[in-house]
Each structure stands twice: as C-alpha cells, then as structure tokens.
Image (cartoon, rainbow, N blue to C red):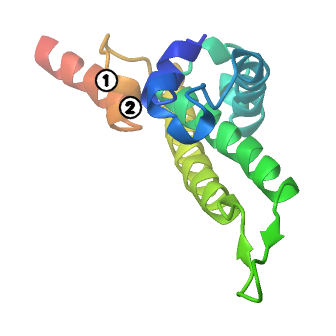
Amino acid sequence: MLDPDIIKEFIKDKPELNILHDNMEQFSDDLLDVIIPMTYQEAAILAPSVARAPSQVPDVIMLHGVIARLLESESFLELRNQLQYQDNNMSSAPLSAKQAQYTQLSQMMRAYFQQLLSAFATSSFYNSCWGMASSNSADMDNMYAGYFNINLMQDLTV
C-alpha cells in the first residue's frame, strides 16, 4: 500500500512550505486514508486484469492516481468556496481562482495514471501468457518485455 508520507513528500505538502495554508498540511491523513483505497479500487475497475492483486500495481502508478484524486478533491473545495469582492467601485476580483488549475492538473495526472495503468495491465497480461524472466523493469519498460526475455533465454540455450 502506498505510504501517505511519500505522497506528501512528492507534492511538497509540508507545513513549512504552505505559507498560504497557515503553515499546515493541505491534505490531511484522514483524506489520504479515504483516497488511497479508493484509488486501488479504481485501478481494479480500469484494469480488470490487476483486480486480483491490486497491491501488486507499482507505487509509481498509484502515486499518480492518488494525486489526481487529491487535486480533484481540492477542485471541489475551490469551486464551492468561490467568492467575488469589490472595493470602492473598482472591478470585482476573485478571492480565490484556483479551481480551473486544480481541475486541469487533476485531469493531466488522471490521464497519466490511466496510461501507466493500461501499460502495466497489458504487460502483466502478456507476461502471464508467455512467462517472463525475472526483471525489475519488465513490467514498465515494454509490454512485450517478458516475452522477449523468455525468447532470448531460449535462443541462448539452444
């Protein structure tokens, strides 16, 4: 399971860096406790071949999915709390106008999560069909990596 501290480190959610959040973390541990399992469930839906063992999905893939969910959550908050103010006949200005940026970044992270998850699921499928040589990068390098590694080994033994 993905460690919440790794997520916070990756997105730089540290009290000393969050000056505009009163030096507090932006995303609570309670929120992460909800979003992390939800993202594993989403991975199992998007890639049914990993549904039997979602914990085997590499952390780098799940990290992008969790961050997409966090940004989506923050986007809802920004949308709900939009406020315009006007001072002495000057044009109105938004108190906070970050909803669009949170939504855009969330969509970008979600697309990358889905791309990585799809590649992992395809690679896992091919590896389960043809087997694979033991390699840390076989699942991530190429969807046929396991197949080519086995064929290479067979060619060398002939």
In this picture, is 153 found above or below 68? Answer: above
| Proximity of marks 2 and 1: CB atoms separated by less than 8 Å | yes
Residue 69: give x, y in percent of width and height.
70, 39
Q: Quadrant of residue 100?
A: bottom right
Give, as a three-letter code, the residue at label 2.
Met
Which element is circle 1 on? loop
Q: Quadrant of residue 125?
A: top right
**Residue at the outermost right position:** 80
Does the image show residue 59?
A: no
Mark 2 — residue?
140
Q: Which mark is residue 60?
A: none
Left or right: residue 127 compared with residue 94? left
Mark 1 — residue?
137
- Cα distance, mark 2 to mark 1? 5 Å
Please rate how many residues cluster around mark 1, counting C-alpha atoms within 10 Å: few if below 14, some from 14 to 19, many from 20.
few
Please rate how many residues cluster around mark 2, counting C-alpha atoms within 10 Å: few if below 14, some from 14 to 19, many from 20.
some
Residue 85: give x, y in percent of width and height.
79, 72
Give, as a three-letter code, the residue at label 1.
Ser
Q: Residue at x 57, y 33 (%)?
A: 121
